[in-house]
Amino acid sequence: MFRAKRMPSRGLRLFAVLCVVLGLVMPLAYTTVQFGQASSSDLEVVKAERRGVVYLRPMTRLIAAIADSQSVAVAGRRPDPQVLTRAAAAVAQADRAVGGSLRVHDSWVDLRSRLVALAATRHTGRSAYRAYSEAMDVALFLMLRVGDTSQLILDPQIDSYYLMDAGMLRLPSAIADSGRMTDLEVLRGQGPGKDFPLARVLVARDRVSAAASAVEAGLAKSFGSSASSSLGQGLLGKIDAFHTALEPLAPRSPLVDQPLPPRPDLMEGHRSEFARTALELDTAVLEELDRLLATRERTIEQNRFVVLMVLVAGLALAVVALAWTGRASGSPGKRSRAGTKSTPNWAAKSADARHANEPEDDEPSGLRPDDFLPPGPKHGRPTRKKAAGASR
């Protein structure tokens, strides 16, 4: 009876503890699952952006090589085929590594076929300008495709966004426009023609100046908003060299206030120096961008590990709490059983006799007939057999 009354109380206690544990563990598990899904998406985006940086590095060198070969061909000389070959080989290696995942392989095949055609056909003058300009447009479009498919163009952080803007958009365009500006001035000097007026040279120069201004302003924003203390330390010298090479080629002043372009031979020297410094700056910017993305990737992975450990610890504490509660609930039953064993036999029999419907013996009371016989000579009381013989 005592144990039957205690069992419902112990069961209710375990049920209450179980409800409390589930009320704590289930929200924790749900939050962990939601965080895991969100962090997995962020991690995939960061990895895709890093693949985009892998592709952009050789692409900028290829654009610089196309601009150099175009200037040589427009001037009437034969470009060195190894310049384009080496640059194209580096892009082909990057395409084999990450081109399939970025879905830009078909665009690279189109650009490579154009480069092969340029190497096979000797273009000079205006035909060289048109042929190389078409290849340059395809190369710039390929860089934009890489930015779209890798989601670099949608980077949410200010520091990495402006590094992307400078390394993927501004500096490659400035290198391409500086070559076009110089080549247009060379073509204008070769003879009169309505296809190459001075206005086109000035517009190209203004585009170079605007791109360079955007590069410096964007990098300043990136340095000011970044949590990294080392960002910008390796870029300051390259930014100064880039600014120095820009001034004689495209002064940063309104278009109406700019002087006329210098002679083509002087402009070509300025263009070569500007392209070299722009390429060095672009390479350093992309390295800084990849370093920021790598840090972001490690942070996401560490946060995922910490949240997983918190979930495991919560589950372990829940199991320990349930086990401890079950053991504590079972201890009163053990104590009651131990107390029952220590109770004297006469007290237990008296309690059972009071609660039983029928008596233990056939007699109506606890006294026996032997209790009324006189004591015997030997044992003090005759046995039941001797008493029966005496009565006969």
Image (cartoon, rainbow, N blue to C red):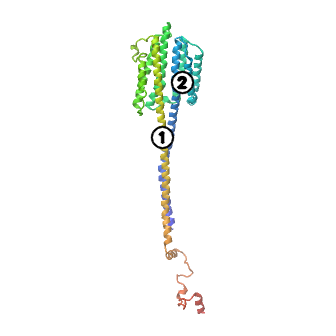
In the rendered structure, the answer to whether residue 387 lies left or right of residue 278 reads: right
Query: In the rendered structure, which amino acid carries the disc numbered 2?
Result: Leu
Secondary structure category for the residue under label 1? helix
Give the percent coordinates (x, y) of residue 216. Answer: 41, 24
- Which mark is first along the chain, 2 or 1? 2
Give the percent coordinates (x, y) of residue 120. Answer: 60, 16
Q: Residue 178, can we see it?
A: yes
In the rendered structure, the answer to whether residue 379 lies left or right of residue 269 reads: right
Residue at the outermost top position = 192
Task: Give the answer, above or below, for where 202 lies relative to 48.
Answer: above
User: Which numbered marker is on residue 281?
Assistant: none
Give the percent coordinates (x, y) of residue 287. Answer: 48, 29
Give the percent coordinates (x, y) of residue 285. Answer: 46, 27
The residue labelled by disc 1 is 302
User: Which numbered marker is on residue 142?
Assistant: 2
Q: Quadrant of residue 83?
A: top right
Q: How many numbered marks, from 0 up? A: 2
Q: Nearer the viewer, residue 173 or 272?
A: 272
Task: Give the answer, above or below, for where 115 lies relative to 8.
Answer: above
